[in-house]
Amino acid sequence: MTVIAVGDQSLSAGTGELSAVENVWDQIDWDQVSRAVLRLQARIAKATEVGRWNKVKALLSPPVGL
């Protein structure tokens, strides 16, 4: 059985208890996510073009605190 943690909730996959996960998934602002990804891709491309490899590495790393 797979356990999925969402915030303070733990849900078991395969038991029909995924409605809370689906709720969270549906609440994501996908337009905002898409814009953030496009901005990040542009920043990575620009840093790559000018050879700022430490910046590229930092941009590819997950944000601190997650």
Image: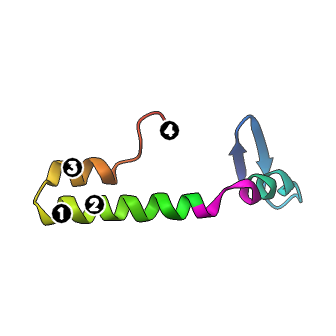
Where residue 15 appears, as percent x and y from the top left, is: 87, 58
**Quarter of image, res 23:** bottom right
Tag 1: Cα neighbours inside 10 Å, few (<14), some, or many (≥20)?
some
Pointer 4 residue: 66
Pointer 2 residue: 44
Q: Secondary structure at mark 4?
A: loop
Q: Amino acid at mark 3?
A: Lys
Q: Amino acid at mark 4?
A: Leu
Pointer 3 residue: 55
First reached walking from the N terminus: tag 1 or tag 3:
1
First reached walking from the N terminus: tag 4 or tag 1:
1
Q: Alpha-carbon distance for marks 1 and 3?
A: 8 Å
First reached walking from the N terminus: tag 4 or tag 3:
3
Where residue 34 appears, as percent x and y from the top left, is: 53, 65
Q: Secondary structure at mark 2?
A: helix
Q: Alpha-carbon distance for marks 2 and 4?
A: 20 Å
Q: Alpha-carbon distance for marks 4 and 3?
A: 19 Å
Q: Main secondary structure of the magenta part?
A: helix
Does the magenta run of residues contain 26?
yes
> Which of 32 and 19 lies nearest the eye of the viewer?
32
Q: Secondary structure at mark 3?
A: helix
**Quarter of image, res 13:** bottom right
Pointer 1 residue: 48
Tag 3: Cα neighbours inside 10 Å, few (<14), some, or many (≥20)?
some
Does the magenta run of residues contain 45?
no
Q: Foreground mark, 4 or 1?
A: 1
